[in-house]
Image (spheres, rainbow, N blue to C red):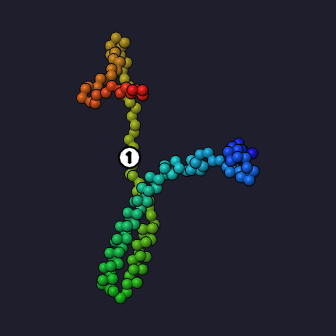
Amino acid sequence: MHPLTKYYIHQAGGGGGIGPIYSLPPFIQSGHGIGDYLGPLFRFFKPMLFRGAKAGAKALGRAALQTGSHILSDIADNPAGYKEIISKHLQETLPAKMAGGGRRKRRRTPSRTRQPPAKRRKRALSTRRKRKPPTRKRKRGGGTKRRPPIKRDIFA
């Protein structure tokens, strides 16, 4: 019998009719499971996914507004055949917008031939400049002043 179960039975006075009050599950999970692996991946890819979705939604919205304005102007001219007008405009617009094309690629500038860096002349030891060790700059006053710590006596 599990020690905690014994403890609870003992607390209840040892009555045999109580039975096990506390039972452990057969498997105790330690950690976040598969979320430990998928969480960081999602956080990494989320900005890229939403950036592309935002641009796509913007382009689709513009196309929808243009198509809607064309449909309304054609219906104003010929109100009787509105079903044909709508289907004609949608058949023209949707395949063009759904074809995609992705993000536009940047144009690369023509690569220049890389020249090796010019060689530096070595100086004689006597003419070399000596480097000074870096010094720390002190902060000037004007900032917040430090207050002395408050002494607290628990018996006062």
The crowd level at tag 1 (other Cα within 10 Å; few <14, some 14-19, many 20+) is few
Q: Residue furthest top?
A: 126
Q: Amino acid at mark 1?
A: Pro
Q: Is residue 43 above or below residue 122?
A: below
Give the residue at mark 1.
110
Q: Residue furthest left?
A: 142
Residue at 40%, 84% in the rendered image: 83
The quadrant the N terminus occupies is top right
Residue 152 % position (x, y): 39, 27
Residue 28 % position (x, y): 65, 47
The quadrant the C terminus occupies is top left
In front here: 103 or 9? Answer: 9
Residue at 33%, 22% in the rendered image: 136
In front here: 41 or 82? Answer: 41
Residue 126 % position (x, y): 34, 11
In front here: 25 or 128? Answer: 25
Residue at 33%, 17% in the rendered image: 132
Give the image quarter of residue 4: top right
Label 1: state its secondary structure: loop
